[in-house]
Amino acid sequence: MNRPLPTDPRFLRLRLKLGLFIGLGLVLGLSLLLGMAVRQGYFSAKTPVFFIAESGADLRAGMAVKLSGFKIGTVRRVDLNEAARVDVEMAIEDRYMKWVKTDSVATLAREGMIGDSFISITRGTPELPALTPDDRLRFELGRGLADIAQDVRNRVVPVIDELHVLLKYTNDPKGDVRQGFANMNRLAAELRETRRKVDTTLAGIDQLGREDAPATLAATRKTLERTDAMLHELETTIPAWREQATQTLQALNETASTATRTASETERMLKETAPQLLKVLNETEALMLESRSAVSAARTRWPFTGPDVAPVSAEPVKD
C-alpha cells in the first residue's frame, strides 16, 4: 500500500537539505583538521637531526622540540642502539634550521614542575654554520623532579641541622637564652618593686601637698607681703637719698672748685715771693757765717779760750 507523500512544505526537499548539512559539516571538519595539521607542521619540509642520550627516561616519539620557547619540530624516533645507548631522531622544520648551529645543545626540559617533557635546543653562535641534515647535536640531561628534590634537600637539611643546634642551645638551662630569660624575670620583679616604691612616694607627695602645701603657701604669702612693704619703703626712701646724694655731689664739686682756686692762688703767690725769699735766705746765711767767724776769732783771745767750733758751711740757695 503506497503511503501518501507529505504535503507540508517544510518537508519538501528534506533529503537534499540533510545532505547539504552533512556535506558542509564534513567540509568544516576536514578544513579544521587540515588547519591543525598545517599548524603542527605536518606539511612543512623538515630536516632530520640526531642526538645520543645515555637513558631513554622521559624520551618518547612525538614529543615537542622547542627553540626559545617556540615549537620547531617533533621527536620522530627513539631507539636503543648496539652500545645500549639511546638514539633520538628529531624532525625540525627547515625554516628554523638557520638558528640551529653546530654548537647548539639539546636538553631535556619540562613545562613547569609536573608538565610534559620536551626537547629544548639552545640558539647557537651566529658566526658558526647551520647544522646540516643527519648531523648530531650534543645532548645534556636536564634537571628532573628528582634532581630538584635532591637540590632542595641539600639546601634544607643544613638549615634543619642548624635549627636543631639552635633549639638545643636555647633549651640549655645554663645557656645564655635561659639565663637571659631568668634575668628578665628578675628585672621584671625589680621593676614591680620600683613601681610600688614610686606609688608610695607619689602617695606621700600627694599627702604632703594636701597638708603642708597650704601652710607653706601662707608663709610664702606673708613673706611676699613683707617684701612688698620693704620695696614700697625703698621706693619712698630712694628719692630722698637721691636728693641728698645730689646735694652732696654739688657740695663736693663746689669744694673741689674752691680747692682748685686756692691751689692756683697759692702757686701764684709762691711764684711771686720766691725770689724775695731766696734773697732773704742768702742774706741770713751770710750773716750767720760772719757771726761764726767773729765768735771763732774772739775765742782765740783770753778769757774766751775754749774748744774750737767749726763753722757750718752751707751753700747759698739757688733760684
Image: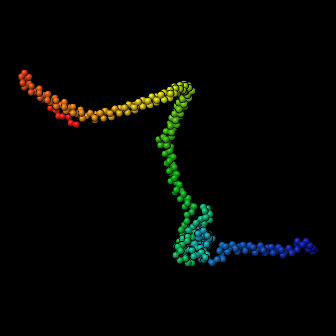
Of residue 86 and residue 25, the one placed in the foreground of this image is: 25
Q: Is residue 46 above or below residue 215?
A: below
Of residue 84 and residue 142, the one placed in the foreground of this image is: 142
Work out which quarter of the rendered image holds the N terminus and state it: bottom right
In the rendered structure, the answer to whether residue 76 lies left or right of residue 156 reads right
Of residue 272 and residue 121, the one placed in the foreground of this image is: 272
* Residue 164 location (% of width, % of height): 51, 48
Q: Is residue 212 above or below residue 40?
A: above
**Residue at point 92%, 73% (across, down):** 7
Q: What residue occupies the far left of the structure in this picture?
A: 302
Q: Quadrant of residue 196?
A: top right
Work out which quarter of the rendered image holds the C terminus and state it: top left
In the rendered structure, the answer to whether residue 281 lies left or right of residue 307 reads right
* Residue 12 location (% of width, % of height): 88, 74
* Residue 272 location (% of width, % of height): 28, 35
In the rendered structure, the answer to whether residue 233 lies left or right of residue 297 reads right
